[in-house]
Every structure is written in structure tokens, then in C-alpha cells.
Amino acid sequence: MRTTLAVMKRELGGYFTTPVAYVFIVIFLVLTGIFTFSQELGNFYERGQADLRPFFSFHPWLYLFLIPSVSMRLWAEERRGGTIELLMTLPLTPWSAVVGKFLAAWAFVGLALALTFPVWITVNVLGDPDNGAIVAAYLGSLLMAGGFLAVGACVSALTKSQVIAFVLSTSVCFLFLLAGFPVVQGALAGWAPPWLARTIAEFSFLTRFEALAKGVVAPRDVVYFLSLIGVALGANAVVVESTKAG
């Protein structure tokens, strides 16, 4: 645990030594504001409802492009610069390095998400929202971000190019999003057995997040995201271990 926290502290501090962290946070906050309050998109004021559904409904699509920009550097940069060999010579296990890097990235994204609190304040000023449901939606958003990050970190460990890591991470996460889409399910209905279509839909980020965004904290949805994070980080550790062995 001590080595994991040391890696996490090192990585988290590294985010703020370059302008990348501040650019990410600004872009995230600006885009969430535009998508939420724009009359053509979020329609926040015109809906006449005191909730944050317009705010959270765009999170999966924002994360699809923004999260890979965070995860792409986690291991690809280490491999490109040759520092991964140096990292692996330190007295820590690959698992500690993987978890430490992931937790740093997750904490960074969590900070960006926490900075959206003025939107929460706004809806409380304008009406009487169900704040319990909003807390559940924030939890769901954070868990979904963790899922995106874990997948992106695993992909990043497979390549030395941040660009390739970004493209591959976005593509894989896009598949996770589309798994529960009516278009995909409709296409599967034509040839796949019902159980297979249902199984694929169960892996959809959208399907899982929609319930949490409505304030319904179902244990199966929380377990899904935590399990996905665990499996992706386990695969990440295997890749890093093979790199060390090579």
C-alpha cells in the first residue's frame, strides 16, 4: 500500500507540472456548461425541472474523448521514454505501479468532476431537487470515468505511441458505450440468440450509467464498474509484467 500511494502521489503531482491538466479541466468544465445550459442541447432552463439530467446525460460522450486523453500517457509515455524499465527496477510490484497510476488519474478526473459543483448549486437555487439522486449520479459518473480510465490504461501499456493509445482507447470505449444501444441490439436481434444480445447489453456503459444517473444505486451496476476496473487493471499488470520480463 505504501508503494502504491507513493506512485499515486508522484503521478498526481506530475499532472500539474504541465499545462495539460489545466487545459483538460477547463475544457471539461466549459463543455459540461455548454451541453447543460445550451438551449439546443441540454435545454436546462426550458425543461422547467429541478434536476441535473441534462448535465449527466452528456457525461458518457464527454468521457469517450476526454478520458483517453488522460489515460494515453500513463504507460505509453513511460515506454516511449524508456523510463518503464527504471520504474520496474524500483522496489515495487507491477500491481502497485498499475494501481498507483490508475488512482492518480482517477483522482485527477474526480477533481475535475468535483469542480462542476456550481451546477449543483444552481439547480438548488432555482428549485428543490432530489439531492440524494444527484449524489448517486455523481457516484455513477465517477465510477464510469474509472471504467474508461482502466480500459485506457490497459491499452496505453500496449503501445509506445500516445496517439495510438488514444485512438485504440476511444475505439474500445466506444464499443462499450454502443453495446446497449437500440441500433446494436436491433442488429443482434436478426441473428444472435436473445441471451447473447442481453449479455452484450449488460456490458454497456450507457445501460449501467443511466440507472445511476436517475438516482438508483443498484448494487449490480456498482459491482459491474468495480469489476471492470479490477479486470482491466489486472490485464494492465500482466502487460507491464511481460514488459519487465522482456
Image (cartoon, grey):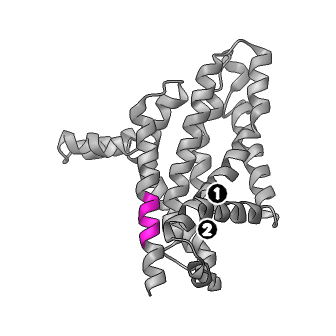
Q: Residues within 10 Å of mark 1 (few under 14, many from 20)?
A: many
Check residue 71 for magenta coloring: no
- Please provide the residue range marked out in magenta: 232-238
Residue 79 occupies which quadrant of the picture?
bottom right
Q: Residues within 10 Å of mark 2 (few under 14, many from 20)?
A: many
Q: Please, what is the three-letter code of the amino acid marked with disc 1? A: Ala
Earlier in the chain: of badge 1 and badge 2, it is 2
Which numbered marker is on residue 2?
A: none
Q: Eyeballing the image, is 101 above or below 141?
A: below
Taking the spot 41% from the left edge, 71% from the top edge, the residue there is: 238
Q: Is residue 225 left or right of residue 47?
A: left
Q: Please, what is the three-letter code of the amino acid marked with disc 2? A: Leu
Q: Position of residue 186 (x, y in %)?
A: 30, 41
Determine the main secondary structure of the stretch shown in magenta.
helix
Q: Secondary structure at mark 2?
A: helix
Q: Position of residue 15 (x, y in %)?
A: 75, 62
In the picture of the structure, the residue carrying the numbered disc 1 is 105
Q: Secondary structure at mark 1?
A: helix
Q: Eyeballing the image, is 192 above or below 2?
A: above
CB under 8 Å between discs 1 and 2: yes
Q: Quadrant of the C terminus?
A: bottom left
Taking the spot 62% from the left edge, 27% from the top edge, the residue there is: 135
Q: Nearer the viewer, residue 5 or 173?
A: 5
Taking the spot 49% from the left edge, 59% from the top edge, the residue there is: 151
Which numbered marker is on residue 74?
A: 2
Give the farthest residue toward the top. 128
Residue 207 occupies which quadrant of the picture?
top left
Q: Position of residue 7 (x, y in %)?
A: 65, 65
Taking the spot 60% from the left edge, 49% from the top edge, the residue there is: 63
Q: Nearer the viewer, residue 90 or 41?
A: 90
